[in-house]
Amino acid sequence: MVHINSNFQKLPGSYLFSEVARRVSVYAGAHPNSNIIRLGIGDVTRPLPDAVTAAMHQAVDEMGTAEGFHGYGPEQGYDFLRTAIALHDYQERGITIDPSEIFVSDGAKSDCGNIGDIFGPENIVAVCDPVYSVYLDTNVMAGRAGDYDPRTGKWSRIIYMPCTAENDFTPAIPREKADLIYLCFPSNPTGAAATAEQLREWVDYANANGAVILYDSAYEAFITTPGIPHSIFEIEGARTCAIEFRSFSKTAGFTGTRCAYTVIPKELERDGASLNALWNRRQCTKFNGVPYVVQRGAEAVYTPEGRRQVEANLAYYRGNAQVIREGLLAAGLTVSGGVDSPYIWAKTPGGLGSWKFFDLLLDQARVVTTPGAGFGPSGEGYIRLTAFGERGATREAVQRIRSVL
Ligand code: PLP
């Protein structure tokens, strides 16, 4: 008789976004034609840059010829893309990353979720609270999380690092010893960015304790404040303790196209094994590479036209972030994020619970947000709004929220 991985049964039933979708659908059913505006889920709305679609068209044409056809590609990604990433995302920022340290993939979500394959079940995991739920849920599936306590909303073997207004939404180093430390800056969901000094503390901690930092930098393209690191590898010592995840999703509109990458330096070893070699082994066994056409599209992001077009899209989303941030501040809410990030993190008024405020905004403003409590216990009392919407709808949503408040 087959036994399932019973860890899956430990996962709480309703995933955040399905519960949001359920409530929105109940509301829409009861109020047809109510013109609901969605500032909840973090998906982009701007089309792919022309430079990207032109490169993809050309790659499709190549694939239709005997000379240009590509079958299985290298599991780690084509050299043309790994070299472009090493040059433009790292070397141009003064960071040395060899193309062989870059693994192209179909998403930072897959990589953040799959990276646990190369680590033992006994490792103690530390996550920010609130957090991008993939880090937690995949460790639950792998049996690293212990048991869930519905009263506290916490897993017994996970170290939670509260990110609150008191610490500017950047976590302090925990007192307990952590092995695998997930950090995400700029943060989903709080929109906070970490300074070089803050990251240096983490790198020093990880090197001193043999820990590994899993650094999710999916939103680095939104950083505007000078001096804020775009990569953990800007910090001295990170090459011996950190893995970095990056994505073309939010940078260049690839949420539906799928392309991302993970950087594992050659110096990073634990238990005498190279983590770069382990990940390579994992990828070669379980992954057959990103489509050639998609990788050509990603390469075009780094051309002069591609960069200009990507920058224009980012400027559009930054403009939305400013509209939301300033509108909510004017409405009297306490707001953070939205400067180096597409996420705006707003405190609920009058001590309202996250879901209560979510329901109020849905019911009275017909605006969908994301309840902060869905990202972890420390998210209670907050909502998250995203700047990825269409400008007119974003303005309208903020206007409606202001009139409700
Ligand atoms: N990491 C964070 C923090 C995210 O918020 C998201 C998507 O929302 C991802 C990773 C997923 O990125 P990708 O589209 O590359 O899978």
Image: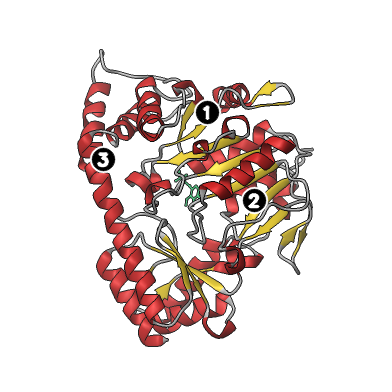
Q: Name which residue type carries label 2.
A: Asp
- The x and y percentages for residue 381 are 58, 75
Quarter in which the C terminus is drawn:
bottom left
Quarter in which the N terminus is drawn:
top right
- Inter-mark Cα distance, 3 to 2: 35 Å
In the image shown, does 372 or 57 lie closer to the viewer?
Answer: 372
Q: Residue at x 44, y 44 (%)?
A: 230
Residue bearing mark 1: 287
Mark sitting on residue 97: none
Q: Residue at x 50, y 58 (%)?
A: 192
* Crowd rating for badge 1 (residues with CA inside 10 Å; few <14, some 14–19, many 20+): some
- The x and y percentages for residue 259 are 41, 37
Residue bearing mark 3: 307
* Number of marks drawn: 3
Ligand 1 within 8 angstroms of badge 1 C-beta: no
Is residue 255 something that shows in the picture? Answer: no
Q: Name which residue type carries label 1.
A: Phe
- The x and y percentages for residue 16 are 56, 62
Mark before the other along the chain sequence, 2 or 1:
2
Q: Name which residue type carries label 3.
A: Arg
Q: Residue at x 39, y 55 (%)?
A: 43
- Inter-mark Cα distance, 2 to 1: 21 Å
* Crowd rating for badge 2 (residues with CA inside 10 Å; few <14, some 14–19, many 20+): some
Q: Residue at x 41, y 62 (%)?
A: 338
Q: Is residue 264 above or below residue 164?
A: above
Q: How is the image coloured?
A: secondary structure
